[in-house]
Image (cartoon, helix red, strand yellow):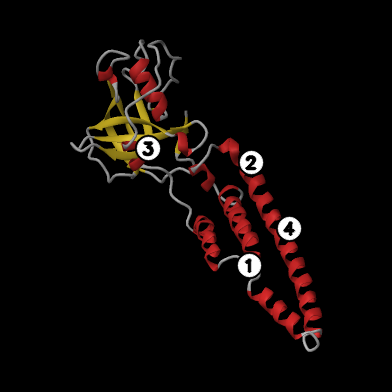
């Protein structure tokens, strides 16, 4: 069975990729939605490659078995050659049994896909944001409350010289993070390509009690200006909450940066 190890490993990895990309939305925990076709093609290619490797291994096994039968027919006449033949079998090309442990990570990905990044990742990102100049933003849609991403809310709160958020009721969805002093935030991770390049967008929430860390919530409230646009005092933005509702984690837990 050890000769089939590479085929099994390829099949497990390919099946795991297809599971998260073709048969579910779990791939959104790792990459942007636009990369789904590439994941599906990659997973299918690995499964097909696993089949090809298994076929080749099967052919080699049949050929070797035929060679064994031929060698056994001459054992009585050529005892020494028979011993050499036996020795060659005892030191065959099969790899070490420990190589099967390589299948464990692929099997774990197939059965237990890791969760989306959460508060642990958000809290360990340095408070560094891409340099942006203070300026004006397009007008917000009419009506209250207005649904905003955490990224858009933060950009307007910090860099909008026209203060387009002032007097508007906003609705923000994200997960809960905390500081050591008890301050809590509604937070979202922003990605450009995949989870590896994630950065943090967050808003400090005041006026309502914080749910447990990593709980997903929708916060409705109004922006509280802090500091001048573009200043360090303006970050992170603050929202005075009027209501809070716990929600399920969305299929895509990230915002596009």
Q: Residue at x 77, y 83 (%)?
A: 72
Q: Which of marks 2 and 3 is in front?
A: 2
Q: Nearer the viewer, mark 1 or mark 4?
A: 1
The residue wearing badge 3 is 174
Q: Nearer the viewer, mark 2 or mark 1?
A: 1
Q: Residue at x 79, y 70 (%)?
A: 63
Of the residues under marks 1 and 4, which one precedes in the sequence? 4
What separation in Å lies between label 2 and label 3 (alpha carbons)? 28 Å
Work out whether 101 lies above or below 81.
above
Secondary structure, mark 2, is helix
Of the residues under marks 4 and 2, which one precedes in the sequence? 2
The residue wearing badge 2 is 38
User: Quick one: label 4, few (<14), some, or many (20+) residues within 10 Å?
Assistant: few
Work out whether 142 lies above or below 193.
above
**Location of the N terminus (image quadrant):** bottom right
User: Quick one: label 1, few (<14), some, or many (20+) residues within 10 Å?
Assistant: few
Image-quadrant location for residue 128: top left
User: Quick one: label 2, few (<14), some, or many (20+) residues within 10 Å?
Assistant: few
The residue wearing badge 4 is 52
The answer to the question of whether label 2 and label 1 lie on touching residues, with beta carbons closer than 8 A, is no
Q: Work out whether residue 250 or residue 146 is closer to the camera in this orientation and state it.
A: 250
Q: Can residue 245 be seen in this view?
A: yes
Of the residues under marks 4 and 3, which one precedes in the sequence? 4
């Amino acid at each position: 069975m050890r000769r089939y190890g590479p085929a099994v490993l390829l099949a497990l990895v390919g099946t795991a990729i297809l599971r998260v990309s073709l048969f579910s939305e779990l791939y959104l925990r790792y990459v942007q939605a636009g990369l789904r076709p590439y994941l599906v093609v990659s997973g299918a290619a690995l499964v097909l490659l696993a089949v090809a490797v298994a076929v080749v291994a099967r052919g080699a096994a049949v050929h070797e078995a035929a060679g064994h039968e031929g060698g056994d027919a001459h054992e009585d006449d050529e005892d020494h050659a028979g011993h050499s033949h036996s020795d060659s079998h005892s030191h065959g090309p099969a790899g070490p049994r420990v190589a099967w442990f390589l299948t464990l990570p692929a099997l774990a990905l197939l059965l237990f896909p890791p969760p989306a990044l959460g508060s642990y990742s958000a809290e360990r990102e340095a408070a560094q944001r891409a340099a942006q100049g203070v300026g004006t933003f397009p007008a917000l849609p009419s009506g209250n409350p207005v649904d905003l991403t955490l990224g858009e809310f933060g950009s307007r709160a910090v860099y909008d010289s026209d203060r387009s958020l002032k007097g508007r009721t906003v609705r923000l969805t994200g997960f809960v993070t905390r500081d050591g002093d008890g301050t809590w935030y509604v937070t979202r991770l922003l990605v450009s390509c995949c989870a590896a390049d994630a950065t943090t967008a967050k808003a400090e929430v005041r006026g309502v009690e914080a749910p447990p860390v990593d709980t997903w919530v929708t916060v409705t409230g109004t922006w509280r200006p802090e500091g001048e646009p573009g200043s360090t005092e303006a970050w992170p933005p603050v929202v005075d909450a009027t209501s809070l509702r716990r929600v399920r984690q969305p299929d895509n837990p990230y915002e596009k940066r």
